[in-house]
Image (cartoon, rainbow, N blue to C red):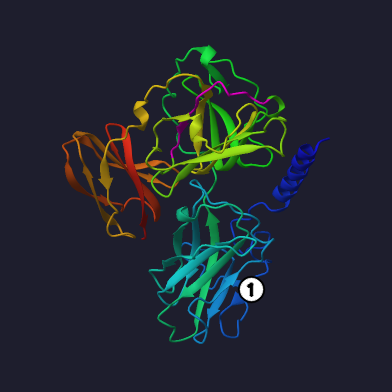
Amino acid sequence: MNNRTRLLIMFAVILMITTTVFAQNAPIDFETGGYGMNWTWAVFENDTNPPLQIIDNPDATGINTSTTVAQFTALQAGQPWAGTESLHGADIGTYTIDATNSTIKILVWKPVISDVGIKLVKPDGWALPEVKVANTVTNAWEELAFDFSGQMETGFDQIVVFPDFDLVGRTQDNVCYFDNLTFSEQGAPPAGPEAPAPTPTYNATDVISLFSNAYTNVTVDTWSAVWDDANVNDVQVEGDDVKLYTSLVVAGIEFTSSTIDVSGMNYFHMDFWTPDPTAAPAIFKIKLVDFGADGVWGNDDVEQELEFDASTLSTESWVSFDIPLTDFTGLTTTNHIAQLIISGDPNTVYIDNVYFLNGAVSIHEEINMPTGLLSNNYPNPFNPVTNISFSISEPGQVRLDVYNVKGQLVDTLIDSHKTGNTYNVSWNADTVTSGVYFYRLSLNNKVIDTKKMTLLK
């Protein structure tokens, strides 16, 4: 057994143990037999730090009739950011934020209006700033929704709650209650492509194909290596075989048992489709790894990773990457290509027609995007009306859609022919629930931009 095999087996065992022990524990309902009641909650920055108490629901009416809730007493002498946190390495387990799993909700009952904050922390203490949302009623239960789509990361193992985050300063001790922290269901990914990627028409003698119905494919050992962080499924789009990656952080595609000599090729090709937003800071990465002259992992390996941003990516459109192998500048040898690694954000990705080519490539229409500008909505957050403005530089069929965090179409605000100009439109969201929504502008069936907005009722 070589060193690489031992490492992969060790990693697989560790991953299996980690997955078994640290699954996400939710919802946090503080009920007997549920999650939260017996967790180790620490209180910080709250003067004498009275402990978090799990008590009978003092107001079992309205939207919260549960039996028990958490009580946090925010002391006047405490800091504005006083809060409570679960125990690292236990309690919450592990939690990954991706495009289908980026909303956290909490029920709160407070005697004052102030921000409620929620923060997720990794085992080493790394965290982005807390997300804050203010309650809008007092002395009654209210559900608040927190948008974590800007913090898409993997491996969080601690949750921190700031029930009364008041930078102005408290005038009294405030007894606050919270309950039923829920996390977006992973669920099924948003709707996929309605049509397959363009069928390649190159001569088979000029192609080394990893995955394509148009060619005979070489042997690929795995489309999701044991060391990666992604889920992959085989799906079909109108009879065409496609690889679907969900919860993608990094995916290892390996053909180590029979490495590929692409020294006679000059392009790498991949077709890409995602339902996720592709505006900045979204980045999709493609890496090729060559195992060097000895053809095995380690020693003389070379690799190169390329990044693609909003100037190339598109939401809900097939994008064809035709990459000169010379762009992979670190790939100084190409006789034993053994790994293709994709990573980044978007996190739901459809992949097709993965091959190396010897020849000239055609220019695909999919990467020639129309020009336009989608502005930030105002106000944001809003209740229930917000205004959206956009401009287009050429005439065409304009569509402005609103989607929820699961990628489901909620409303179509515009679907008509427009001349090049600046336009304004209002969205009245009185019929939908509080939460995060995305609005997307398309011109002639090409997506220009996608932005997010927050509805607070």
Residue 94 point in image, percent of width and height: 63, 54
- 282 horizontally vs 289: left or right: left
- The quarter of the picture where the N terminus appears is top right
The residue sitting at 34% across, 27% down in the picture is 365
Residue 380 point in image, percent of width and height: 32, 59
Which of these two is toward me, 189 or 363?
363
Q: Is residue 274 magenta?
A: yes
Q: How many marks?
A: 1
Numbered disc 1: secondary structure = strand
The residue sitting at 17% across, 39% down in the picture is 420
Count neighbours of disc 1 (C-alpha within 10 A) and say few if under 14, some if 14 to 19, many if 20 or more.
some
Image height check: is 239 above or below 350?
Answer: above
The residue sitting at 46% across, 59% down in the picture is 146
- 229 horizontally vs 402: left or right: right
Q: Which residues are magenta?
A: 259-275
Which of these two is toward me, 387 or 385?
387
Image height check: is 411 above or below 168?
Answer: above
Image height check: is 147 above or below 43?
Answer: above
Residue 52 point in image, percent of width and height: 61, 75
The residue to which callout 1 is attached is 42
Which of these two is toward me, 243 or 355?
355
Q: Is residue 370 magenta?
A: no
Which of these two is toward me, 89 or 219?
219
Image height check: is 80 above or below 137?
Answer: below
Q: Amino acid at mark 1?
A: Ala
Residue 227 point in image, percent of width and height: 68, 42
- 436 horizontally vs 235: left or right: left
The answer, for residue 342, to whether it is visible in the render is: no
The answer, for residue 218, to whether it is visible in the render is: yes
- The quarter of the picture where the C terminus appears is bottom left
